[in-house]
Image: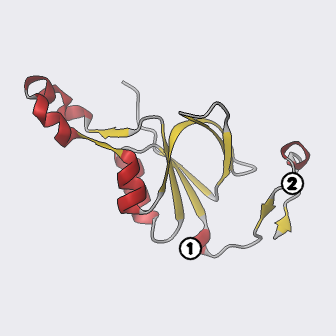
Amino acid sequence: QVFEAGRHAAALGPRFRLRAMPPSQRRVLVIGGSFAGLCVARDLKDHYLVTIVDAKEFFEYTPGVLRAYVKPKHLDALTFTLYPVIEGRMGCKFIWGEVKELNGADRTATIKPVFSPENEIIDFDYCIIAAGCNF
């Protein structure tokens, strides 16, 4: 392991990082767990260590929600909980929380997990923003 010296290293404390990781160990951070985020994670999971961060714990097919108003049993076909799908079936890591800050120079993201009072900082090699829209 090699000590990574940077201008912010003193503030963050000692951090260790491998100098050159093989492509299979590179880390991809995907912000957003809807259509684009899940598709990107599915396509990259065999080549990279993928982490998905989303502010919701569930996927929702929003265009179909109106049908659920007239047929409530249809809602189960429109939604699913992200954690078992992302971690269980896809083999990626899921963080239920909000990305508060991206630092491209240091390749870090500050994340506020839903059930934690403190922020977490995670490293990444590549970041894909697939947060969608807010309506």
- Left or right of residue 130, residue 21 in this image: right
- Left or right of residue 99, residue 61 in this image: left
Q: Which residue is mark 1?
A: 24
Q: Amino acid at mark 2?
A: Pro
Q: How far apart are the alpha carbons under marks 2 and 1?
A: 25 Å
Residue drawn 16% across the image and 26% down it:
66
Looking at the image, can residue 102 be seen? no
Q: Give residue 10's mark.
A: none
- Left or right of residue 135, residue 29 in this image: right
- Residue 98 image point, x, y percent: 55, 35
Residue drawn 40% across the image and 54% down it:
86
Foreground mark, 2 or 1? 2
Q: Quadrant of residue 81?
A: top left
Secondary element type, mark 1 = helix
Viewer-proximal residue, 28 or 95?
Answer: 95
- Residue 69 image point, x, y percent: 13, 23
Instruction: Note whether 88 is above or below 59 in the view shown.
Output: below
Q: Which residue is mark 2?
A: 14
Residue drawn 42% across the image and 49% down it:
37
Instruction: Note whether 116 is above or below 92 in the view shown.
Output: above
Which label's residue is closer to the chain start, 2 or 1? 2
Q: Amino acid at mark 1?
A: Ser
Residues packed near mark 1 inside 10 Å, few (<14), some (14 to 19) or many (20 plus): few
Q: Quadrant of residue 103?
A: top right
- Left or right of residue 11, residue 87 in this image: left
Q: Looking at the image, which residue sits at the far left?
A: 71
Q: Quadrant of residue 25?
A: bottom right
Secondary element type, mark 2 = loop
- Residue 31 image point, x, y percent: 51, 44
Viewer-proximal residue, 97 or 135?
Answer: 97
The C terminus - image quarter = top left
